[in-house]
Amino acid sequence: MKMKRFLSILLALLLSLSILSGCAKQEAPPVVDDDASQTQVKDTTQVDAQEPLDPAAVILEHTTTYLNNIPENSNMIPAKEAMERIEENPDALFIVDMRAKEDYDKGHLPGAVNIPFAQMGKNLDRLPTNKQIIMYCYSGQNSGLGVSTVKLLGFNVISFQGGMNFGWNTLELGEDTLETTENALPDAKTPDLSEEEQIVWDAVAKFFDEGKTYMEAAADVSEILEENPDAVFVVDLRSGEDFAKGHIEGATNIAFKEVGKNLDKIPKNRPVYLACYSGQTAAQIMTMLRLNGYNASIITRGMAGWAGAELPVVE
């Protein structure tokens, strides 16, 4: 009887030990740190959000900002005022002559360096960030192209209105006010650019490297319009008042400072010809359109060139 009781107690003990051993082998459930879990989710979301920049979107944003913030002087300075600034404080200015070297050598504004239009893209890193830059060319159109694109890069730049032919010559200062000695370009400095800034820089450099000013003589544009007026799109950038007094037949009036708000009215599926008063403001608009994929060109000398060619206008 005692033996049976002893065996029963022994079996009970063995069973208890077996149960305890099984429980000891089970791992405790992991402790979930809610804060850490949320942090991990947030980090993953941040990584996914860092998508590559779309160059076209970047260019559109920068050019639209430019078009919507054109200053009262339209990025141009009268020849007389430019000469006064040069005389008063030449060290505060950086003058860029965009004409061909042979014309630069014949006579240029005091202190001016020579960077022809097609070479501008390769010399952007020589432009100073701590000075007012004044650009000039023959008539103001090339410098209009230069000012708009270089201004996109953040430089403090303005155009010499009318260039040498229609700006400086009107001052009748005489050849003795010009220099014939070449002024050396400053050393190049590699710019510290963000990814977005690099996209704009590369686009501007490419535009200059193509070496094309995209200017069409008024007579040639008139001939195109006579042959097939629906094949092209003409934009008159002058004020509505001047447009009403006389404009190219079929032209659409979008005032210079309103282009940024009306890009959707300008087609990309056919050539666009831009006309302003003298071609200088049209040059600024043309570069902005070109950078965004428009097939845009300037009517040389604008409506002044149209009138000079004795071409018809309508009211």
Image (cartoon, rainbow, N blue to C red):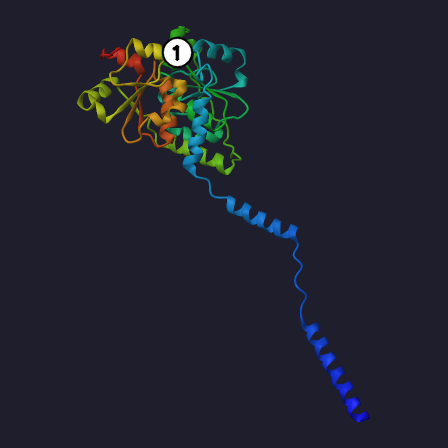
Task: Name the residue at the right extreme.
Answer: 2
Q: Residues within 10 Å of mark 1 (few under 14, many from 20)?
A: many
Q: Position of residue 218 (x, y in %)?
A: 25, 17
- Which of 86 and 194 lies nearest the eye of the viewer? 194
In the picture of the structure, the residue carrying the numbered disc 1 is 167
Residue 70 screen position, x and y as percent: 45, 20
Residue shown at 22% from the left, 25% from the top: 230
Q: Is residue 159 left or right of residue 233?
A: right
Count of numbered tags: 1
- Residue 105 seen from this side: no
Q: Residue furthest left?
A: 227
SS assignment at label 1:
helix
Give the image location of residue 263, x and y in percent: 37, 26
> Callout 1, which amino acid?
Gly
**In this picture, is 166 found above or below 214?**
above
**169 lies left or right of 65:** left
Q: Quadrant of the N terminus?
A: bottom right
Residue 278 horizontal/vertical position (percent): 34, 14
* Outermost residue toward the top in this view: 172
**Residue 165 visible within the image:** yes
Q: Is residue 309 left or right of residue 131?
A: left
User: Residue 237, located in which quarter of the rendered image?
Assistant: top left
- Which quarter of the rendered picture does the C terminus lie within? top left
Residue 266 is drawn in which quadrant? top left
The residue nearer to you, when weighing 33 against 173, is 33
